[in-house]
Image (tube, helix red, strand yellow):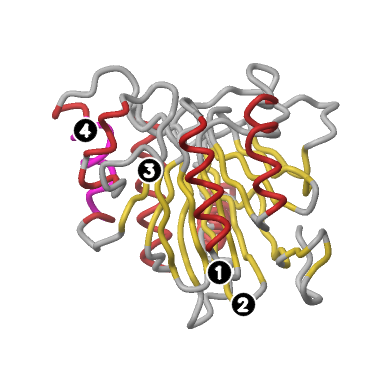
Amino acid sequence: MKTLRRAALALLLLALSASAQQPQLPAGNDAVRFAVIGDTGTGDKHQYQIAELLKNYYDRYPFDFVLMMGDNLYGGESPDDYEKKFSRPYQPLLEKDVKFYAALGNHDDPAQRFYEKFNMGGKRYYTFKKGDVRFFALDSTYMDLEQLRWLEAELQKSNDRWKICFFHHPLYSSGKRHGPDIELRQALEPLFLKYGVNVVFAGHEHFYERIRPQKGIYYFIEGGSAKLREGNIGSRSEFTEKGEDQDNTFMVVEIEGDSLNFQTIRRDGQTVDAGVLPRLVNGQPVRATQAAVK
């Protein structure tokens, strides 16, 4: 009898695990679909496990590209390092022509911008467009006047429905180790507000955090796709809408029309955060969204 119970329990757990890894997003035909990873370049088992789960998710829910939040290579940056810390773990996705778009972190050599598979075009900061979404990759480690002028010019001429910036250091964070980068916020936030940036992704903190909307902008931290700083999200923070600092994570995102659908998956395959966010204009949703954020 005990053997039968154990077998039944094992089957139940297997079914629950398989169900947890099923895509939660609606996968509309005209959607812009991408994944988000950060602080990945360790070359250790945690990076490889997240990479494998990312590929498994792709097999069920094909996304077109991946955003990298920086700290793409810890330690050395020899050809062997690029192989061990990037090409090898993500080879199954690279073979499917999934593009990776990298931002530079404080542990990265700026020469990474010349690495073809990071799709940076030899630039520390750059922009690209997918559907109705314009992405702006910034170098938050060396934020100088030239970069700020470039960003303002690019934001000003963009008439895309969604404007998304991604870079390494978070403007808002509940991390006890680093916390928010106030100086960077003072430099960037006025431009974000003036030109209607909708979403900001960052890394640096080795955990996942969805920040409560700040002045009509959605902020996410995904810096736990290989490294992890357990228990680092401050329990009394005013910023945290949802956080995960107990295991490694990655995100999948789908933007269709005026809705952003997201799902954050832990290394054990469990969804730790998911929902639908309406595009905000002057802090107000463009249209009512039926699905609520969990």
Residue type at mark 4?
Tyr
Helix, strand or loop under label 3:
strand
Name above or below for residue 242 compared with residue 130.
above
Residue type at mark 2?
Gly
Q: Alpha carbon of mark 1 to alpha carbon of mark 3: how far?
A: 21 Å
Residue type at mark 1?
Asp
Tell me, yes or no, if residue 268 can be seen here.
Answer: no
Residue tagged 1: 160
Residue tagged 2: 257
* Disc nearest the viewer among 4 and 2: 2
Q: Alpha carbon of mark 3 to alpha carbon of mark 2: how far?
A: 25 Å
Q: Residue 160 lies in magenta, yes or no?
A: no
First of labels 4, 1 by sequence position:
4
Residue tagged 4: 82
Q: Which SS does the magenta portion mostly show? A: helix
Quadrant in which residue 111 is drawn: top left
Quadrant in which residue 226 is drawn: top left
Percent of width and height locating residue 160: 55, 69
